Image: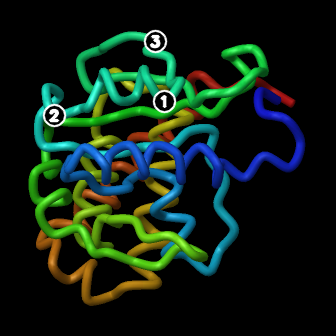
Amino acid sequence: MGLPAGDTKEGALREVIDVLEAAGTAYAVIGGVAVQIYSREPRTTLDIDLAVTRFDQIPRDALLKAGFVHEGRYDHSDNWRAPGTRPKTERTAIQFSSEDVGIEDAVTRAQVIDAGGYRLRLASPTDLLVLKLAAAEEQTRRPSKRRIDLLDIINLAEEYPSAAQAVPTLDERVARLSSELLKVARTRGPER
């Protein structure tokens, strides 16, 4: 489904991090990859999500020179594909998020970690909770994506109770989202 069997996104992640580090771009790894790093539960994702404070900080020329392909800019993301010889749709998608709820804090407070022999800047569990809540509450997103965000929120809150406590309205927002997304699933979901 999309990426070749065995593709772990590690190569694409290393490549994009190398470009960002060489350009001196402040960033944070967010989204499914960040949740995967923090979680004991298996987590997969089709793309690599990165936060930058402003879209104009994305080192476009350096990314293009490194072989990344720009796919377009949307309201909440600037989308790229990793370099490679495979067809573009079979290469890892890279999505930069910026200028949105919690992004600046996530970038500013990102923690440098060792990710198996290379360093990267990872959003904190608290900042991931804030970003995942904003994504799950975004009415224009597909319900299936919003449900994945909700599951990520629950998993992060279980693994990092102090991070969950740092988000004052977390319990109420999760309860509201659970109810809302269950109603959406009942009205839109196919019978099996």
Q: Which residue is mark 1?
A: 66
The amino acid pointed to by label 1 is: Ala
The amino acid pointed to by label 3 is: Glu
> Residue drawn at (40%, 78%), measured in percent from left and top?
113
> Residue drawn at (36%, 45%), measured in percent from left and top?
50
Q: Quadrant of residue 3?
A: top right
Quadrant occupied by the N terminus: top right
Q: Quadrant of residue 2?
A: top right
Q: Label 1 near label 2: C-beta < 8 Å?
A: no
What secondary structure is found at the residue carrying circle 1? loop
Which numbered disc flags the more N-terminal residue, 2 or 1?
A: 2
* Residue 52: numbered disc: none
Residue 141 spot, x, y in % from top left: 40, 26
* Distance from Cα at disc 3 to Cα at disc 1: 15 Å
Q: Which residue is mark 2?
A: 57
* Distance from Cα at disc 3 to Cα at disc 2: 17 Å
Which numbered disc flags the more N-terminal residue, 3 or 2?
A: 2
* Callout 3 crowding tier (Cα within 10 Å): few <14, some 14–19, many ≥20: some
Residue 132 spot, x, y in % from top left: 34, 52
What secondary structure is found at the residue carrying circle 3? strand
> Residue drawn at (15%, 34%), measured in percent from left and top?
57
The amino acid pointed to by label 2 is: Gln
Q: Which one is in front, 155 or 189? A: 155
* Callout 1 crowding tier (Cα within 10 Å): few <14, some 14–19, many ≥20: some
